Amino acid sequence: MRLGLIASILLVSTCLTGSLEKGYQDQQDPITITVDSTNFRFDPPSVTISEGEAVRFLWNGELLPHNAVDKSGVFDSGEPSRNVDYSFTFETGMNGTYEYVCEPHEDMGMVGTITVEAITIIEEEPEPAIMPNSEETTLPGPLTAVVAIMFTLIPVGALALFETSRKRAKNQE
């Protein structure tokens, strides 16, 4: 009985792990751009991201105030400051090249570039519907997992009942 219970737990945990894993794959940390105050530069000076990703401008305790402003007005971290934590997400359809500057230090060459690549959306073709009289029957992914779990747990439950009945019969003798 213990072996059946362990097998059932492993099966359920494997099914759950596979379905939960996808949710974590889609999350990404933003690219962080900082300031190199000694050379009046953004670090890194240029980055490449995909649509849907974010860029974070982050600096603390700088001697001079800085900001990050896109030349075309798409994003603006605000007034120059010694402490900045500003993020901007480039949504789908915003692919292109964005040049940004630190307004107080643009003449000193404090500029940067963000290249946003278009994401390729691959549309899956719907699976053909199975006719009721068809010999082949498939179940949707989540339903398949439920059926697999049921077919694992039912024999385990039956085995547990059998073991319990056997022990009671043995104790009554």
Image (cartoon, rainbow, N blue to C red):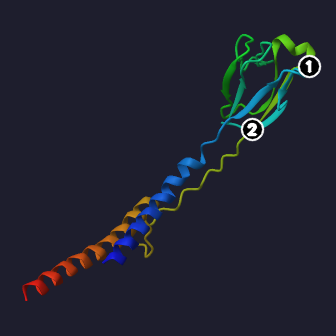
Q: Is residue 43 visible?
A: yes
The residue mark sitting in front, 2 or 1, is 1
Image quadrant where one finds the C terminus: bottom left
Q: Residue at x 45, y 68 (%)?
A: 138
Q: Residues within 10 Å of mark 1 (few under 14, many from 20)?
A: few
Relative to 85, residue 144 above or below = below
Taking depth in this image into account, of 144 and 169 the one nearest to the observer is 169
Q: Picture coordinates of residue 125 (x, y %)?
A: 59, 56
Q: Is residue 117 visible?
A: no
Taking depth in this image into account, of 5 and 139 the one nearest to the observer is 5
Image quadrant where one finds the N terminus: bottom left
Name the amino acid type tagged 1.
Answer: Gly
List the single residue furthest toward the bottom.
Answer: 173
Q: Secondary structure at mark 2?
A: strand
Q: Residue at x 90, y 22 (%)?
A: 39
Taking depth in this image into account, of 142 and 152 the one nearest to the observer is 152
Q: Secondary structure at mark 1?
A: loop
Residue under numbered circle 2 = 49
Relative to 35, residue 149 above or below = below
Residue under numbered circle 1 = 109
Q: Is residue 107 left or right of residue 72?
A: right
- In the rendered structure, find residue 147 and report the number of the disc placed on it: none
Q: Picture coordinates of residue 37 (x, y %)?
A: 84, 21
Q: Residue at x 37, y 70 (%)?
A: 8
- Find residue 26 and report its image quarter: top right
Question: Along the polypeptide, which appears first: circle 2 or circle 1?
Answer: 2
Name the amino acid type tagged 2.
Answer: Ile
Q: Residue at x 26, y 73 (%)?
A: 157
